[in-house]
Image (tube, rainbow, N blue to C red):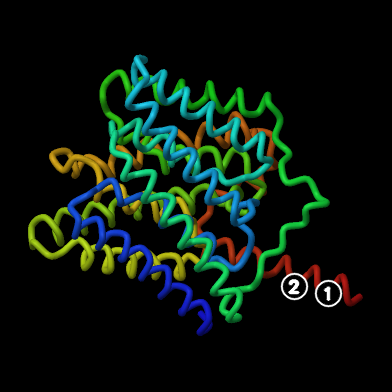
Amino acid sequence: MNKHKLIRYLFALIMIVLMVGISEWLGEKEILFPEMAALVLGFWVIDKKIWTVSRPMLIVLMTVCAFFGILLVRFSPFPLLVNIAISFVFTSACLVVTRTTLIPITSAAMLPVLLGTESFIYPISVFVMSLLVVFGQWFLEKNGLRKAVIIDRKKGKYKHTLQHWIKLFFGLLLIAAIPVLNNQLYYIVPPLVVMFIEFSSSSSGFRNRPLQVYLVVVIAAFLGTIFQYYVHTLLGLSLMFTVTLLFLCLFVLFEITRKPFAPACAIALVPMIIPQNNLLLYPFQAAVGSAVFLFAAMVFFLKCYRWKREHLLICFLPQFVRCRIDRPNRKERKIQELG
């Protein structure tokens, strides 16, 4: 890991700990927005374009969707499953209309719906933190700590059809129906929904390593729970200190796997905001929920059953085994190219 990336990790850690510290100091959990950790990783640490969106549009979309989620909780007369559907339709329409790929806005609208949050502190916090994310990315690029990501406006920024979003809509409702009816909402926490949409819609390389993504997500959920329960609740240490240790471990995990996955940051922060009486159930439910979401994305959207056996084998092998298999092929290609 080079020095610039280490500095970006440090800035990301400061941003996340600052958010948690202010939330703890003021006693307002609404300030703590897990998806902001994913945005910081995507826009600050990862040195490539993760989402196609301009900086002003990022602020607008995140804030508007957060406000919409609060308004839905305050004024909607419908049951929870219908409100989830409404929030998904709204955020999907925002992505289609603005022709952007900022999938985390799904979490911004859905989180207050699942948690029953009514305070306007939440959208105000999302607005302020979105400003900080945008300013931080500009600062890092201005000082040569991160490569500037240029959006080519001549190229289409959005390729998914209305039919694709309709399939996602019904897929989400089918998966969410049983957990909602049984009041087991940890199976469908918003970061897992974001992961489902990302996996079904993005063309990024992480779609070719579902096993690795699943393991990172499950480990993130377990780490978040362990640190929250043992370090914060039992040992009584501050939430700031707890989150600092948590994300140091998570960032090391990203470097070991060499493939940072932004939604995992949000999944690790969820234990800090959910009711603590059932905290220890969270990692197990997150593991089951992520498995179901990944299975649905792989089968019904990526249609992995049509892939060649060699492709499937590579997808479900651990990283260190994949590297050993891939290297001879790369050498052969180089020899062929030189020859």
Viewed as shown, does residue 110 lie left or right of 295? left
Image: 39 above or below 332? above
Residue receiving disc 2 = 331
Amino acid type for the residue under numbered disc 1: Ile
Amino acid type for the residue under numbered disc 2: Lys
Along the line of sight, which residue is nearer the eye, 200 or 169? 169
Q: Tag 1's secondary structure?
A: helix
Q: Tag 2's secondary structure?
A: helix
Where in the figure is residue 246, as x and y percent of width and height? 29, 64
- Identify the residue at horizontal 59%, vertical 35% (top origin): 94
Where in the figure is residue 134, as x and y percent of width and height? 53, 61
Viewed as shown, does residue 81 lie left or right of 276? right
- Identify the residue at horizontal 51%, vertical 79% (top origin): 1
- In the picture, the disc for residue 46 is none
Neighbours of disc 1 within 10 Å: few (<14), some (14-19), many (20+): few
State whether residue 291 appears in this view. Answer: no
- In the picture, the disc for residue 335 is 1
Report, in whole angstroms, how far the alpha carbon at label 1 lies from the one at label 2: 6 Å
Proximity of marks 1 and 2: CB atoms separated by less than 8 Å? yes
- Identify the residue at horizontal 40%, vertical 33% (top origin): 69
Residue lying at the far right of the rendered structure: 339
- Identify the residue at horizontal 25%, vertical 46% (top origin): 273
Image: 159 above or below 327? above
Along the line of sight, which residue is nearer the eye, 175 or 336? 175
Along the line of sight, which residue is nearer the eye, 214 or 14? 14
